[in-house]
Image (cartoon, coloured by chain):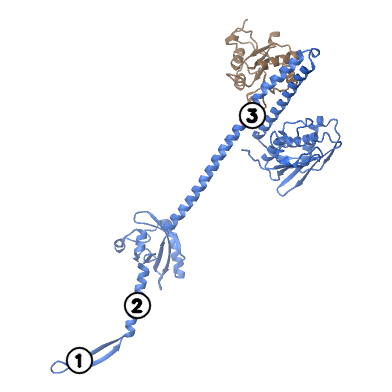
Chain colours: A blue, B brown
Amino acid sequence: MQVPKGVPILEPDGSIREWVGTVNDVHDRKQAEADLRENQARLNSFVEADLIGILFGDIYRQIFYANDKFLNIVGYSRADLEAGRLDWVNITPPEYLPLDKLGISEAQSRGACTPYEKEYIRKDGSRVPVLLGYRLLEPEREQSVVFILDLSAQKQAEAALLANEAQFRQDLELRVQERTVQLEAANRELESFSYSVSHDLRAPLRHIAGFVELLQKRLDPAQLDDTSQRYLSIIAETTRQAGTLIDDLLAFSRMARSEMRLIPIEMNLLVQEVLRELEPDLAGRQIDWKIEPLPSIQADPSMLRLVLRNLLENAVKYTRLQPSSQISIGSFEQEQSVVFFVKDNGIGFNMQYVHKIFGIFQRLHSDPNYEGTGIGLANVQRIIHRHGGSVWAEGAVNEGATLFFALPKRAEVIEVI
Amino acid sequence: MIDLKRILLVEDSRNDVELILNALSENAIANEVVVVRDGEEALDYLRRRGMFRLRLEGNPIAILLDLKLPKIDGVEVLAMLKSDPQLRMIPVIVLSSSQEEPDLVRCYELGTNAYVVKPIDFGQFVEVIRQIGLFWAVVNQPPPEVYQSPHGVS
């Protein structure tokens, strides 16, 4: 663009005769001004876009300029700002001032700070979480240009998420707790029901047993025909069986409720003790015992004795009719546990029914040669479970059975619910 | 002083009473057995009150106490007996249907002298009663009798 700067030479009649002057080419300056305006506009559009709070201030407390977004974040008006009522120290909660101090000293040495989160106190007293970063202006590095991002929405979302999660977890826990309480109550009820039933059945059974016996004594055997005699002995025998059943059931129920104390147990000694207890059962029997040296283990002594007693009793019982009875006792180690086993060459069982073997009242043999109430192995399982261990069995019909129980090396008491 | 060798049986079940008496006589334990049906009667007997106010004084040599009793149950009777200076020296043998640990603990805490579970099998039952009778009525030396009842016949 060319801007003329001239003086007209006039005719006597006042008309212009000619121009005398210079012509300056101002194209470059115009361009620079336009660029500046454009830059200014662009800058303003950044500042006034109001996507992010921006302010100019100093490192002490002043705010010289702030955009609408910043005023909006902190809830002050432009009038407040212009009246000098806005001071960034005043609107910063005291606990964040040390953080600001750190940021400023970082900016003083590096020119800018690493963005950090803080809070402002809004005019209405509420707090607003923000992310801010600033650069200090050269050369003094005392004046700042600060960018402030409102984090309310994120924080709210985060809090809502956390609350949701906490609520969910709480709900879940509550539900688990409720169920556990219900389950415990149901179990206790069942336990006390089975206890009181067995307990209350004991007295009438005792009476039947007693009076049958008294009756048998009063009757002259010579006067009594064989059938009556047989009836009486069936009544007596059946009562005795029912009595054993109820006593076993009571012992089973007691086992779930009695307190456990875990102490180191010499398994070798315990096996010997149990074998001594079983001596009456062993009378007249030829049994080939193979007893390996066993490791000691942490367990409740009286409960573990019962486990061993049950397993050995079974082995002795189910080998009764074998031409030569063999029973072996051994152990092996697994990563977390020690496994003990009792193996016999007795009548065994069909693996098809192995899942029933530890169930209460489950008997895999109806043969009258192998009497039992079906509580022994249920008790074994209950005891081992309470020790945090497991039980299993292997066998085949007429080829013997092996019963295993694993006890954890690091024992801890498991409460049955 | 033969009347002092009485045994007090506290038992509400007539069947049990009959079986126990039978077992005792079977074992030739000839002590007189006084039978009361519940805790209240037991205390009346021991304290010579109510229907027992006219009985001869003197404590039984032993009390066979069933735990399950109507009105005042066995554990309560035991607690009262053992906290009564006049009665607490009388040996008490608890007869129970079960060996429930809490019952056992409670009875021993209260000071029972023995705790016996009645076996279902009659043979074993007779044997248990025989041993109780033999020990408490024959072997054991009962505490010396203290006569200080205001109702005493002088």
Q: Residue at the location (70% across, 30% down)?
A: A248
The residue type indicated by label 2 comes to Leu
Quadrant of the image containing the N terminus of chain B? top right
The residue type indicated by label 1 comes to Pro
Give the SS element for disc 3. Answer: helix
Can you say whether A64 is above or below B131 in the image? below
Which x, y percent locates residue A208?
A: 70, 19
Q: CA distance from mark 1 to mark 2?
A: 35 Å
The first of marks 3 and 1 along the sequence is 1
Q: Any magenta on residue A329?
A: no
Q: Is residue A165 visible?
A: yes
Q: Which residue is identified by label 2?
A: A36
Residue A195 image label? 3
Q: Which residue is identified by label 1?
A: A8
> What secondary structure characterizes most of the magenta part?
helix
The residue type indicated by label 3 comes to Tyr
Tell whether label 2 touches label 1 (CB within 8 Å): no
Q: Chain of mark 1?
A: A
Position of B88 compared to A22: left or right? right
Q: Nearer the viewer, mark 3 or mark 1?
A: 3
Position of A123 compared to B34: left or right? left
Q: Residues within 10 Å of mark 2 (few under 14, many from 20)?
A: few
Q: Residue at the location (68% across, 30% down)?
A: A249
Q: Chain of mark 3?
A: A
In this picture, which residue range is highlighted in magenta?
Answer: A191-196
Q: Nearer the viewer, residue A286 or A260?
A: A286
